[in-house]
Structures are given as structure tokens and as C-alpha cells.
Amino acid sequence: MTANLFDTLARTITDPDATAIETLSCQQITYGDLVRRTARMAQALAGLGLKPGDRLAAQVEKSVEAIILYLATVRAGGVYLPLNTGYTTAEMDYFIGDAEPAILVCDPARAGDLADCAAKVGARLLTLDAAGQGSLATATDAATDDFATVPRAPDDLAALLYTSGTTGRSKGAMLTHGNLVSNAMALREVWQLHAPTTC
């Protein structure tokens, strides 16, 4: 049995038609939709060169697309590195240079500013906006739902989060699949999560 964070989520799905995400505009994404959309994006990422253990840096707006990107990266065996949309090009240059991702995903409006940052470390530059448009979206649209989640061990890296850097340069904190599953289970128990109400 794999310890991939996505597999852990998928094993808890009892009703594929149940709502997984509900947006402020009342758009509802079912668990079945979530599985299919992450499969397509994971397949696209793998086709674009993301290999298990590779880092994917993402400077994208908070959105459903960002959630899909996170889950698809983990599903493909990659390591997700979220970067604040407020970071300047100089700050991005530091993070990209330090983390050395295989892929950098950003809003299409930032692609020109970040091309040099990506090129310095040999990262492939892809674009994705909050509305689901960009070069990664185009590749995802051409993919199929047929993707087998990459097996990962509990100690394999799943995410890399940089500290605020208040006492010096920001440092990358490494989170494993086991860490994130444990945190999610603890929060579910403490927060007493329940089925969402509909709009």
C-alpha cells in the first residue's frame, strides 16, 4: 500500500458524487471530478518532464486550480513548493536558485519576469492563472483521466515550504507524505469537519 498523500485522500472517498470543493461563487467540484482533474494534470506534468522526487515551484493565485496543481504534483510523485504571489522577481530568483525546481508554474502575466530565474536552474516554465488558463492548462486539456498515482513512502518528500526569513534568509522546511497525512488526520479530529452545506 502506498503512502502517497493523494492515495490516502482517495482511500477516504466513499461517494464520488459528494462535494469535495465548493467555491464562493457556488461552483461545486465532486470527489470524482477532483480525481479526474488531478489525473489529467498529473499526466500532463509527467509528460512535461516531472519525475518522482522533482520539485515543482508554483507562484499562482489561490484558486481551485492551485489546489488541483498541488494534488496533481503530489500524485505524480513530485514535491510541491508554493511561493507567495507577492514575491518580487529578485526574491523569486533566490527561492528558485535555492530549491532548483524542475518546473516553475506562474501566472501568465509573470512569465516574462521569471523566465531568467527558471533558465538559471534549467527549470521548465509553465503558466496557469486562477481561471484555469495558460500553457499547463493547455497540456492538461490534452491529457486523459488514465493516470496511476506514483507510489511514495511515508518518508518521501511531498512539499517544501520556505520560512518567513525574519532572522535571516528564508530556509526550506521539508514535509514528507507521512507528515502531511498525520497533520491532516489530527486537524480533521480537532476541527470536527463535516459535509459542507450547499449554496
Image (spheres, rainbow, N blue to C red):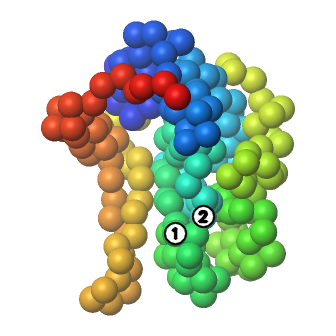
Residue under numbered circle 2: 59
Q: In which quarter of the image is residue 172?
A: bottom left
x%, y% of residue 199?
52, 28
What is the total number of numbered labels drawn onto the structure image? Answer: 2
Q: Distance between the residues labelled 1 and 2?
A: 6 Å
Are the residues at dot 1 and dot 2 in contact (C-beta closer than 8 Å)?
yes
Residue at 52% across / 69% down in the picture?
84
Residue 178 image point, x, y percent: 27, 40
Helix, strand, or loop for circle 2? strand
User: Compared to 99, does 9 lie above or below?
Assistant: above
Residue at x 64% of width, y 72% of height: 121
In the picture shown, does residue 2 fall above or below 53?
above
Q: Please say whether residue 148 is visible from this viewpoint.
A: no
Apparent side of residue 11 relative to residue 115 in the rendered image (left or right): left
Residue in view at x 55 percent, y 21 percent? 30
Q: Which amino acid does label 2 sit on?
A: Gln
Q: In this view, does 130 lie to the left or right of 98?
A: right
Q: In this view, does 134 lie above or below 71?
A: below
Q: Which numbered marker is on residue 84?
A: 1
